Image (tube, rainbow, N blue to C red):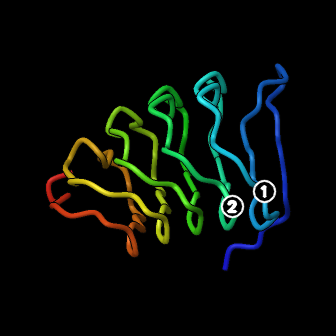
Amino acid sequence: TDRRANLMNCDNDGRLTKVWLGYLELSGTMPTRIGELEQLRVLSLASQRLHGTLPTELQQLLHLRELWARENFFHGELPALSALTRLEVVSLERNHLSGTLGARHVPPRVRTLFLQENYLWGDVDGA
C-alpha cells in the first residue's frame, strides 16, 4: 500500500502543489473548488470515506501528475481527463464508478492506470 506521510506542499508563491491525505478516514465529497488549485501536481485522497461524483473541475488541474482516489465510495461517470496532459498515474480502483471508458478518459502520458473493481466498460487502447 501507499502509506506515504500525510503531506501538503506549496511552491515558492504559496500555491498548493501536493495534497497527500491518504488513510485518514475522511468523509464527505470532493469539493468542486478543487479546480482552483491550479498548480496541484499530486492529489491523494486514497482510502477515505469520500462519496459523490468526481467533480468535472478535476479537468482544470493542468499540472496534475498523480491522482490517487482509490478505495472510496465515488460513483457516477469518470470525468474526461484527456486534457491533463501531464497526468501519469490514475488510481481510482475500488469505487463505484460506472459508464463507458474511452480515450477521452485517459491522457496520453498515463503510465499507471488502476480502475479495477468499478462498473466501467470500454476500451482505452489508443489513449
- Cβ atoms at labels 1 and 2 below 8 Å apart: yes
Q: Compute the Cα span from label 1 to label 2.
A: 6 Å
Q: Is residue 105 left or right of residue 34?
A: left
Q: What's under tag 1, amino acid-wise?
A: Leu
Judging by the rendered image, the residue that carries numbered circle 1 is 26
Closer to the N terminus: mark 1 or mark 2?
1
Give SS at disc 1.
loop
Q: Is residue 124 left or right of residue 65?
A: left
- The residue positioned 64% from the left and 21% from the top of the image is 36
Image quarter for residue 26? Answer: bottom right
Q: Position of residue 122 (x, y in %)?
A: 16, 61
Give SS at disc 2.
strand
Q: Position of residue 102 (x, y in %)?
A: 19, 50
- The residue positioned 38% from the left and 54% from the top of the image is 110
Judging by the rendered image, the residue that carries numbered circle 2 is 49
Q: Position of residue 84 (x, y in %)?
A: 41, 36
